[in-house]
Image (tube, helix red, strand yellow):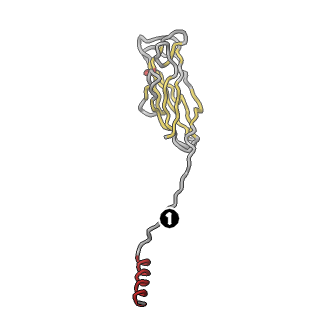
Amino acid sequence: MNKLKMMVVVVIVIAMVALPSLAADVSYGATVLSGQNTVVTTSNGNFGSIMAGSEKVIFKSVNLSNSGDIDATVSAKFSTFNTTGVYGLKNTTSDKVIDGTNFYLRKNATISWTGLFNTDTYTVSITTVPAGGSIVAMDARLVTVTGGPTGTFSGTVVLLFANV
């Protein structure tokens, strides 16, 4: 009987040594970010005089800075409209509008322009502002139509910033 007990003990010890561990420790960590913090540092929205049927560009019309710790996307839309609900640059003395689809933005000196819409329903994505205090400049372009409305126009473009 003692031999049987001894063999059982030896088998148990061998099994404990030979079997792999069925448990493991896993360490976790996280960096909690506060998000983007994008602001307009400078802006120039004055196109000056433009002949009907031509276009004008304002280089570095808006400078943006993001002091946050996440890159920010920048999108835009017009907030100015006339009595019929057409968004864009509105005549200061009448209900005429230079349609929002004739207004474009882009990251400074890139090739592609992004046109805005003439409704409040849609925003358009323009660029990304990197985190950490980077400055990104945006150009603006206005295209006027031959035979289109004339006079003095003004409007507001809303820039929306979001975490990438």
Residue 115 point in image, percent of width and height = 43, 26
Q: Foreground: 149 or 26?
A: 26
Identify the residue at image location x=49%, y=26%.
77
Q: Foreground: 30 or 111?
A: 30
Identify the residue at image location x=44%, y=71%.
21
As displayed, is residue 113 above or below residue 16? above
Q: How crowded is mark 1: few (under 14 residues within 10 Å), some or many (20 or more)?
A: few
Circle 1 is placed at which residue position? Answer: 25
Residue 9 point in image, percent of width and height = 43, 83
Question: Residue most toward the bottom?
Answer: 2
Image-quadrant location for residue 54: top left
Identify the residue at image location x=50%, y=14%.
82
Q: Is mark 1 on a helix, strand or loop?
A: loop
> Callout 1, which amino acid?
Asp
Residue 155 point in image, percent of width and height = 53, 19
Q: Foreground: 141 or 76?
A: 76
Question: Residue most toward the top?
Answer: 94
As displayed, is residue 117 above or below residue 97? below
Question: Residue most toward the front?
Answer: 1
The number of discs equals 1
Q: Quadrant of the N terminus?
A: bottom left
Residue 38 point in image, percent of width and height = 56, 36
